[in-house]
Amino acid sequence: MNDPVERASDEIGPLLRWVTRLPEPVHLELVCAEHTDGPLALEPDVVAVRLGGCLGELPASALLELVASGVRQVVLRADACDRPATVEAVAAHADDLLAACVRTERMVVRATAPDERARPVLDARSLPLARRALVSFSSAAASSGTSSGAGARRGETERERMLDVLRVLSTPPPRPVAAPGAPRPPRPPRDALDRQLAPSAMLTATGCTGCGTCVRTCPVDALRLAGVPTDDGRTSLTLRHVPAACTGCGLCVEACPQHALASAGQHTWADLLTYVPRFLATAVLRGCSRCGVLLPPDESVSLCEVCAFRRANPFGARLPPGMTGSETLPGVDSLSG
């Protein structure tokens, strides 16, 4: 895996499983792999864990997963990190999403050590586990059929994990039942995920010919092209966009040969959570009269480029422009004499 963000998201998996097996929720302090191997000055009731990579590569989804797993507070130690500005930006993004989900937890970025006694730093790749928690961990893993033992299996990609954790965090707790005669408790405030922009392009399509270039170009399969036969023998193609899969890379817009695709902004995280494909365009195409491959909606053309060439050149070759056949081709000796 080449993407450092995806790799960092994968490496946080053991820490998530460890947190869910602890008897009590903890305050977690994360430090970079570059941090010193010596003890770390910590506040009381804080557990320090050294990651396997740079703290700046950790995505916001991983921080939210820690909160959803029961961590009371996540502290990010940026004093030994080479990318403190990135750490602060990721923590701010996680805070915005927590606020949108009406959660009170917040990230803490710390650039200096607190004035407390030193404690050892745990390694995220070899976390200790009490015997009772280990037995519970093994039983849960065997009953669930997974190696995580922490409930649902994590998504394969960082985007899937972000959507999964947002669904968990944005689900309001059940409303308490009011006593007879007592006023009903207020509803929790409406979430603001519909105002949080996500890295997903809001695409539009004008003049689409249904060539499928954008579908073949998309690296995350966020564009879908489906065809339905019509009564007159043609094919009606419909282009749809899946915002939940889109990463906003813009490759489809650049690759469109008709310049039909354009980006009109970004979707919100609320849009992505619905996972509803968005209609972009419809094109009615005819088939090549010889091979049947779909052609652009141009009534003057009945053959595709390949079949048109083969009809015009039945022997499979043609002379370069301007040559009649009596000339000697460059680099070929004359056969006469």
Image (cartoon, rainbow, N blue to C red):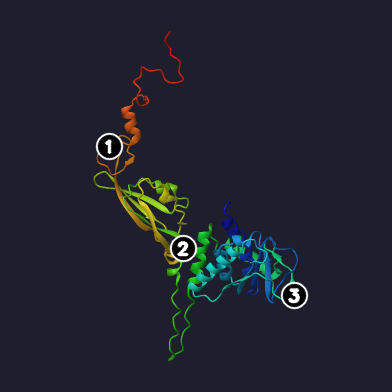
Q: Nearer the viewer, mark 1 or mark 3?
A: 3
Separation of residues labelled 2 and 3 (CA atoms): 41 Å
Return the x and y of residue 80 as percentages of the image width and height: 68, 64
Ranked by sequence position, the earlier of labels 2 and 1 is 2
**Which residue is the site of mark 1?**
302
User: Which kind of residue does numbered mark 1 sit on?
Assistant: Ser
**Vertical position of residue 185 compared to residue 76: above or below:** below
Return the x and y of residue 89 as percentages of the image width and height: 55, 66
**Which residue is the site of mark 2?**
198
Separation of residues labelled 2 and 1 (CA atoms): 44 Å
Return the x and y of residue 220 as percentages of the image width and height: 47, 53
Give me the residue at 44% from left, 50% from top.
Answer: 251
Left or right of residue 37, residue 237 in this image? left
User: Which kind of residue does numbered mark 3 sit on?
Assistant: Arg
Examine the image and state in which quarter residue 332 appears: top left
Instruction: Note whether residue 131 is visible.
Output: yes
User: Which kind of residue does numbered mark 2 sit on?
Assistant: Ala
In the rendered structure, find residue 262 and report the number of the disc placed on it: none
Give me the residue at 53% from left, 71% from top.
Answer: 95
Left or right of residue 8, residue 209 in this image? left
**Vertical position of residue 230 compared to residue 323: above or below:** below
Q: Secondary structure at mark 3?
A: loop
Q: Residues within 10 Å of mark 3 (few under 14, many from 20)?
A: few
Instruction: Note whether residue 151 is visible.
Output: no
Q: Secondary structure at mark 1?
A: loop
**Which residue is the site of mark 3?**
117
Q: Secondary structure at mark 2?
A: strand
Give me the residue at 31% from left, 28% from top.
Answer: 312
Q: Are marks 2 and 3 in contact (CB under 8 Å)?
A: no
Left or right of residue 121, residue 263 in this image? left
Give me the residue at 62% from left, 59% from top.
Answer: 11
